[in-house]
Image: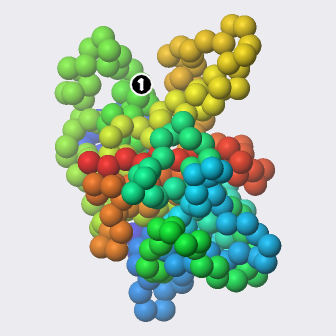
Amino acid sequence: MSDPFAQAAGIASEHLDPRSAAKWLDLLRPAAALDEVGHREVVVARLGGQPGLRAGTPWPEWGGVGPLSFVGELDLAALSAAGHDPGIPLPGAGRLAFFVLDDPDNYGFADLAHLDSFRVLHLPDDGLPVPAPDGTQTYAERELTSRPTLTAPDSFHPVLPATFGIDIDADYPAWLDHPANGADLFDAMERLRGHLPRHQVGGWAIAIQGPVELEAAHAEARRRRAAERDLVGSRQPDEIEMAAETDRWVLLFQVDSDDHVMWGDAGTLYWLARPEDLARGDLSNIRFVMQCC
């Protein structure tokens, strides 16, 4: 298998001048791409099916609304043994199980202000499959393996023009003309990322409607305002504060639409976290974003 960084370096040298290439390469993040498992490939994740819960573990729910749907889980030991660096700190054992409210008859995907509408659980390996509560959306199980890849921020992520010293508010045409924003570079990275669907652990999110990290930052700002609503001086964050907050969030798990499940209109699900929380094993401050066409 070709080295993803060597491939990315070749892409950079082909489409960017040496100085720009060095800056662009510094932005790249490793990720573990997830594909349907083939013959003799190691299973590192599952989508759909039933989560393995220990006896007495309550099924995640949004209080007063209903139970959440089980989307999938990561086998942390298998992912670590595969040696495909997701670029984020993860526990070395157990499983991460991902849930979200999916009730198209009543709520659709919950608004980001509703922070109980999604959940990530760190489960032990000795849990047993538990069926979803009645009325909960379920999905057919399929097994996934992993492969290493490299990811770059999309052209509409503010970190990209900032890296090249372009103020898009003052001179947007300059950004449109920059080769780092060009279709040739984008297409080359698409080929490096590989075939669809784009299920992924870590790395830069493959967004559909704008930076998901920015959406996570806005959700955090809403949470803070709610917590401070009775305090004198509660205020809206300014652009500098929002930029700093955006930089604090990284992709944990990305689930694309595929031949089995369509999220909205060919959409993608994203769970995000702060690296320092992940390093502590703290999953209480996760953010969720759903985007579609």
Q: Residue at x 21, y 27 (%)?
A: 176
Residue 207: x and y in percent read 37, 46
Residue displayed at 65% across by 26% down: 226
Is residue 212 shown above or below 6? above
Q: Can residue 92 be seen here?
A: no
From the viewer's side, name the closer residue of 55 and 92: 55
Say how the picture is coloured: rainbow
Q: Nearer the viewer, residue 233 or 126?
A: 233
Horizontal side, residue 276 vs residue 175: left or right: right
Question: Disc 1 on helix, strand or loop?
Answer: helix
Determine which quarter of the picture holds residue 93: bottom right
| Foreground residue among 189 and 97 | 97
Q: Residues within 10 Å of mark 1 (few under 14, many from 20)?
A: few
Residue 63 can be seen in this image? yes
Residue at the location (23% across, 52% down)?
187
Residue sitting at x 59%, y 61% = 67
Residue 46 as seen in the image, left or right of residue 174: right
Classify the position of the N terminus by image quarter. bottom left
Q: Is residue 45 above or below residue 101?
A: below
Q: Amino acid at mark 1?
A: Ala
Residue at the disc numbered 1: 162
Residue 174 is left or right of residue 111, and the answer is left
> Left of 214 or right of it: where is 189?
left
